Image: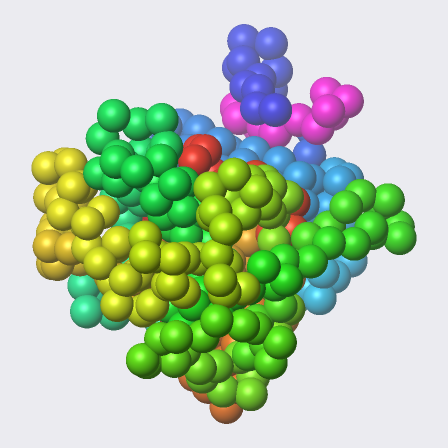
Amino acid sequence: MRDTLPESKFPKALAGALLLNKNGLPRYWPIAWRELYGSSKAESTLQKYFADMEFLYRSVEQRTGIDCLDAFITSLDFDRLRPILQGIFIELRHSGSGSNERWQRITAYLRHVASQLGARNAMSKIFADIDVTDCDGKPNRQMKPSDLRAMPKLVVKDILQLVDTKSSRNPFRSRDNAYRNSTLVNIFLELGLRRSEVCLLTLQSLKRGRDPESGQIRYWINIHEDASAVGETRESKPKIKTVQSIRQIPVPSKLAQEIETYITNFRGRQRHSFLFASQKSKPISKSMINLIIKTISDNLSPEAVKDLADRRRVKSVTPHHFRHTAAVNRLAAFVKDGDPLDVAIDRLRGFFGWSKKSEMPRYYAKAYFETLDVKWSERFDDNVRRLRGQDYVDF
């Protein structure tokens, strides 16, 4: 917490802003910084620095579970500090206006105290690594509209409202179709599947098992061409894109329950084993998916359409926008879980089925650093429809 020692009760050299730990004791390095570097700064500027220091100490404690930043600094434990600072940079990227200035003050503070330990270069290297990833090291660098076709938060929320089966705005009048399309959209947003992968899903694709450690039921989806599938009648047969696209993807329990509810109550009896069916009781096709997404896009609110045009310079959404959106948010979830960026990128590669040589994960990493406003904080295998809540990565 922050406090101020009044000059009326303390010597002038001791009076002024300071930062206290939970026990009410002054933190060492903020006081040292104030005496060495803050004496020439205006009181209002000092208050901003101490507010940002408070944010920094609190953020480190939230990520580690203990109040340890001063210990990390004093012991020059940069290996542990680096991923924490990277996570804080990402959180600031989420937070909107004022985060550039906060990040600049945090870096100035840490460079100054590191200098007192003869480690300014080592501390600067940490920030340089982050700067290379982001190109300019600014948490709110404005992205070019051509960089990525991901959907803004307002658009995603409007889509979710549209496909809500209880919404009066739902453009799909058949209850069965409305529930099918709601499930379809949530699969796209949560899992980021390609159209062909969705078309290949069968009644057997969703799996469940008990976690041996927690005892909880976990769900996953197998993405592959099921040789046992029956009733394939599509002229353009969906195919797995690459060998790397054959994979298993964890599925949030609520999404799994939605899929099971669709199968039980809304899919109806079909002569094929594919998960999604058309009104004519045939396996859903990629062109049908395009039509479903176009119908949703055509019914977006004026506010969502304007936001899409302002942020992306496009007037409609496509199925692949959902994959872009899922990829950037999935990376955010991995990093928030504590993964260093390189580990998170490798996990993203496996999750979305990209080859080891593919540059797509790093492309999304670039988009992630350039576009986030609000963090996702739930673990990817425990999340409960994050897109319906507050923790969403805005674009």
- Residue 68: x and y in percent read 75, 44
Per the image, is 161 magenta?
A: no
Question: Nearest the camera: 239 or 332?
Answer: 239
Coloration mode: rainbow
Q: Looking at the image, can residue 188 be seen?
A: no
Measuring from the top left, give residue 282's x and y in whole percent: 38, 63
Find the residue positioned furthest to the top: 8
Regarding residue 272, the answer to whether it shows in the image is yes
Q: Is residue 19 magenta?
A: yes
What is the number of callouts on the image? 0
Q: Is residue 123 shown above or below 184?
A: below
**Which residue is rendered at x = 41% and y = 65% of the image?**
283
Residue toward you, 334 or 75: 334
Q: Which of 231 and 363 is in front in this view?
A: 231
Is residue 213 left or right of 311 when viewed as pictured?
right
Q: Quadrant of the N terminus?
A: top right
Q: Where is residue 240 in the image (x, y as percent from the top left)?
A: 48, 81
Q: Which of 53 and 285 is in front in this view?
A: 285
Task: List the single residue furthest toward the bottom.
Answer: 357
Quarter-wise, where is residue 349 in the image?
A: bottom right
Look at the image and give the residue range highlighted in magenta. Answer: 13-25
- Residue drawn 44% across the image and 29% down it: 47
Helix, strand or loop for the magenta stretch, by majority: loop
Q: Residue at x 54, y 72 (%)?
A: 230
The residue at the point 19 percent across, 69 percent down is 146
Relative height, residue 280 to residue 358 (above, below): above
**What percent of the width, then of the height, locates residue 125?**
55, 72
